[in-house]
Amino acid sequence: MTTMTTPPAQDQAAQLRKMVASTSIEAKPAARAELKPAPLPTADTARPTAPVIAIASGKGGVGKTNIAVALSSGLVRRGRKVALIDADLGVANADVLCGLRTTAHLGEVIAGERTIMDIAEATNGGFLLIPGGSGIASLADLNETQRETLFAQLSHLDSKCNAMLIDCGAGIGRSVRRLVQAADLSIIVTTPEPTAIADAYSLIKCVVTEARETGQSHHARIAIAVNQVNDIAEAHRVHTRIAGVCKKFLGFEPGLAGAIRYDRVVLQAVRARKPFMQVGPKSNAARDVHALATFIDGALPRATTGRFGFVRRLAGRIVKLGQKSK
């Protein structure tokens, strides 16, 4: 495997909005007609529930959103009907990486002003994007009415796809922890930087500890994805450090979901407001994401009818944690 040069120490997410004004906008695919909402299922209706993958990180600047967008395209290539929810309600930017200029956002859904399918955007990557909104209150701060509205609308989306990705906010906030706990599979993105490694462990520790304190298992299967590595050996070293500490203090070892090598095509794609899977489909980064998508596709639950869906689990996490905080 070719060794890449060391990546520059920069936070790509912090530069995204500055690039918007000077870059072109991708034309939207003509697929809107297929996105009409279906009636909400009744409580007695037994139907499959879409498995949910949470993409999270202990800190910003590790490429989490880039990976979430790329993975969405990768899962589409594997026959999945995918919806990507930008749940970073404070600094949402998945739309920028998809080359879209959105006006509607998740905050309007939470306020009851639009349905989730009203704001859904078809992307050139073949998946639906549910745009977040900068400055919106976090999931943890929503009142009961707002949460019920959001959960009902997520059920709409659940009936439209067979895989949902959630781009969580960076850090270890309450909203992030609850999404990670409720997901079927959680990918914790980190880099070889010591601070990123420490923060990835902190997020895992908070999720597992909080779940145990509220009498619940940490439902999600947690795995590590190491971004911006020079080679696969470096990714294994990072994973070994995190898994070793988890085993010693938490009693379990998260798996290694995959490694994404540093590749200049990623920065080029950000500047072009396009997913790097499209800008450099044969690049090292794109090949590594395809391998990660294969891992995720194989790890997702197959028999989903009759189980507790993501929305119900998420609601349960919020109720339990709300009672604990009183």
Image (cartoon, rainbow, N blue to C red):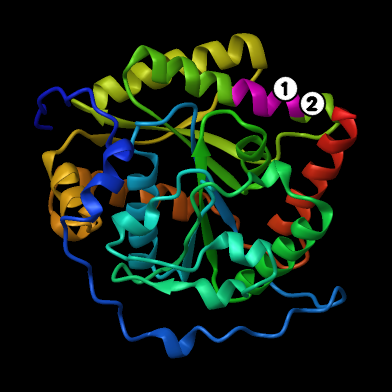
Residue 215 horizontal/vertical position (percent): 86, 31
Circle number at residue 212? 2
Eyeballing the image, is 171 above or below 199? below
- In the structure shown, which secondary structural element does the residue marked by tag 2 occupy? helix
Give amino acid for label 2: Arg
Give amino acid for label 1: Thr
* Residue 7 found in image quarter: top left
Residue on which the image places disc 1: 209
Report the predominant secondary structure element of the magenta stretch.
helix
Is any atom of residue 308 visible in this view? no
112 vs 325, left or right, is left
Where does the N terminus fall, quadrant-wise? top left
Where does the C terminus fall, quadrant-wise? top right
Residue 206 horizontal/vertical position (percent): 65, 23
Q: Which residues lie in the magenta part? A: 204-210
- Neighbourhood count class around disc 2 (C-alpha, 10 Å): few under 14, some 14–19, many 20 upward: few
Q: Are marks 1 and 2 in contact (CB under 8 Å)?
A: yes
